[in-house]
Image: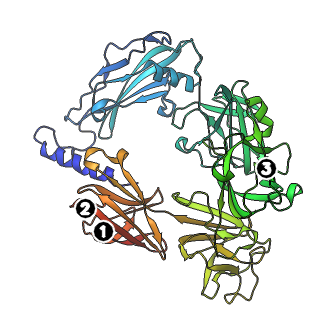
């Protein structure tokens, strides 16, 4: 990600050389020296955790392993299933203090109890485990292992959060990318044990429920409507958006495929017999730009899934925001059981609005944003750059193209401007790098450079652009979608010498057409700097000059020698592989 590790390694090497008179050279051939095994120091053979007694720390200690040539030895401590040789199975891993060189580790009864629960050991029953210390000097290791019986708390662990993860979930298998589920509580805040989430699930890949977004958290599998702690993952047959509900009180789950969310009612086209769809943007967000009406004072509308009157979202009474432009939502079928009072969503002043439906864990609300624009209205919602999260990192979206056969060539054509050829790759046509597109300009997708051929956009054939940006364009003839993506760039600024990465500043830069990002920020002398769109783009340079060229994945920039306010500006290449830069003190 960044070059902190390289810098840290160089510093260690310098210190090592300075003290070479005390520690022998590490250039001896492997095999010409030995590493003894550590031994446990008064380690207990059993531990019984008391959930009603004081939560005193638990310490494990050992005698050192000795390298015959005085190499530095570091350690890792593990609690393992009895006789397991695979450290991937570890219930708990602890790194000693002093960069792993201390001869003991300390943890809490709560941490050990959680590790046992996460691995599905039963409560109040002694678990047969091993304590393992791995000593390491350069690439040589030695191991101490001793059996221990650990009895967990008598009370079962009560979880308060739940997440969706796995290769089949929208953001993939990494625990840190698990998607939070919403805990459904009664109106007075009482916990129900029911969680729900709206997200994409991928066919043929495993899906799990986790209680935390960390490695070692408890995983729930699922089969035929029943949760299985530490069981096999759930697999769906069709890639789609789903409403996922989990009831921990009954150990059950339910999936509802969401073909679409739509608006229905007198405030939208078609009235109560209509169905105006909004598009999924990812991570529980749907949005569309559409016309709102007010045929009479108390006209209203609802959000409806799949055209099903049993899947209605209404507004929670008393949650409205100014001018009735939003509020909290609840499913009509759930409201009475949760003690909530709900109502139809009221109409607003007539005009064009961006409708945002947020069903992510922390929200469950809707927002209406009045659209005041002279830009042409594109057919079939064909707008590049339309998003409810314009300041995200890598922002993407899509819209439908016409259901036509794939041509042999394809162009993105600006009205009154040039035709940009798109490159054929399988079932896709891709832009070469990112294209600097402008808001207010009209574009089309055509198989002839002069625009005289087949137009592939629905409706009036026009594409509008929501905002000036450098967009990556992909036209997929298998899914019949035009996909777009752009990067926002942030200035990351931190004090590396004083472990400041976790306290870094992240300052959003402003895009300026074409291909330019800039920001004015307060910068400190000696701080590390990178210009980042986490974590695809990481512009940096080893140069200390205040202007020059940065490259993606380059070193941290350390050129600020005088604290103050700076105008920071980069001009990126269309492939985002490099950029020119300048820091100008104000």
**Crowding at label 1, few (<14), some or many (≥20) Cα neighbours within 10 Å?**
many
Q: Which mark is residue 583?
A: 1
Q: Position of residue 581 (x, y in %)?
A: 35, 71
In which quadrant of the rendered view does residue 175 lie?
top right
- Image label count: 3
Taking depth in this image into account, of 121 and 535 the one nearest to the observer is: 535
Is residue 285 visible from the viewing direction of this image? no
**Residue sitting at the far right:** 273
Marks 1 and 2 close (CB-CB < 8 Å): yes
**Residue sitting at the far left:** 21
| Disc 1, SS | strand
Q: Which mark is residue 560?
A: 2
**Crowding at label 2, few (<14), some or many (≥20) Cα neighbours within 10 Å?**
many
Q: Earlier in the sequence, mark 3 or mark 2?
A: 3
| Disc 3, SS | strand
Q: Which mark is residue 302?
A: 3
Left or right for 566, reference 452: left
């Amino acid at each position: 990600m960044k070059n902190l590790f390289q810098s840290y390694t160089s510093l260690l090497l310098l210190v090592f050389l300075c003290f070479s008179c005390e520690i022998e050279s590490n250039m001896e051939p492997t095999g010409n020296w030995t590493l003894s095994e550590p031994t446990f120091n008064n380690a207990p053979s059993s531990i019984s955790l008391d959930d009603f007694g004081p939560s005193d720390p638990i310490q494990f200690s050992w005698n050192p392993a000795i390298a015959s040539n005085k190499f530095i030895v570091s350690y890792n401590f593990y609690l393992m299933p009895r006789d397991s040789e695979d450290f991937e199975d570890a219930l708990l891993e602890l790194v000693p203090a002093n960069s792993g060189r201390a001869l003991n580790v300390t943890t809490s009864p709560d941490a050990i109890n959680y590790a046992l629960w996460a691995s599905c050991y039963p409560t109040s029953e002694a678990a047969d485990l091993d304590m393992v210390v791995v000593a390491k000097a350069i690439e040589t290791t030695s191991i101490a292992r001793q059996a221990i019986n650990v009895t967990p708390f008598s009370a079962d662990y009560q979880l308060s959060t739940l997440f969706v993860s796995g290769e089949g979930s929208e953001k993939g298998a990494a625990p840190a990318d698990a998607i939070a589920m919403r805990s459904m509580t009664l109106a007075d805040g009482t916990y129900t044990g029911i969680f729900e989430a709206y997200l994409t699930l991928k066919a043929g890949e495993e899906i799990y429920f986790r209680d935390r977004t960390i490695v070692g958290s408890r995983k729930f599998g699922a089969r035929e409507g029943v949760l299985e702690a530490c069981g096999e993952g759930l697999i769906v047959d069709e890639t789609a958006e789903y409403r996922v509900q989990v009831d921990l009180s009954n150990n059950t789950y339910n999936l509802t495929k969401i073909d679409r969310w739509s608006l229905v009612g007198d405030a939208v086209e078609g009235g109560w017999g209509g169905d105006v769809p909004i598009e999924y943007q990812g991570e529980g967000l749907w949005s569309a730009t559409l016309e709102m009406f007010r045929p009479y004072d108390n006209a209203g509308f609802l959000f409806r899934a799949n055209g099903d009157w049993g899947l209605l979202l209404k507004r929670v009474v008393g949650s409205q925001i100014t001018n009735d432009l939003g509020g909290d939502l609840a499913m009509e079928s759930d409201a009475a059981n949760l003690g909530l009072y709900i109502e139809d969503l009221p109409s607003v002043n007539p005009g064009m609005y961006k409708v945002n439906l947020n069903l992510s864990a922390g929200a469950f609300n809707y927002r209406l944003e009045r659209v005041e624009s002279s830009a042409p209205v594109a057919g079939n919602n064909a707008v590049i750059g339309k998003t409810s999260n314009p300041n995200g990192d890598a922002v993407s979206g899509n819209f439908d193209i016409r259901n036509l056969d794939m041509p042999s060539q394809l162009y993105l054509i600006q009205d009154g401007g040039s035709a940009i050829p798109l490159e054929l790759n399988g079932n896709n046509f891709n832009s070469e790098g990112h294209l600097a597109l402008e808001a207010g300009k009209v574009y089309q997708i055509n198989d002839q450079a002069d625009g005289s051929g087949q137009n592939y956009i629905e409706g009036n054939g026009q594409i509008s652009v929501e905002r000036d940006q450098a967009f990556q364009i992909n036209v997929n003839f298998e899914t019949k979608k035009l996909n777009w993506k752009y990067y926002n760039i942030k200035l990351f600024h931190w004090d590396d010498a004083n472990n400041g990465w976790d306290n870094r500043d992240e300052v959003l830069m402003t895009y300026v057409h074409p291909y330019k990002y800039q920001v004015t920020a307060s910068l400190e002398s000696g701080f590390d700097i990178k210009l980042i769109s986490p974590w695809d783009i990481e512009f940096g340079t080893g140069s200390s000059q205040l202007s020059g060229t940065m490259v993606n994945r380059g070193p941290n920039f350390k050129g600020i020698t005088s604290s103050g306010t700076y105008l920071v500006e980069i001009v990126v290449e269309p492939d985002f592989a490099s950029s020119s830069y300048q820091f100008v003190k104000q």
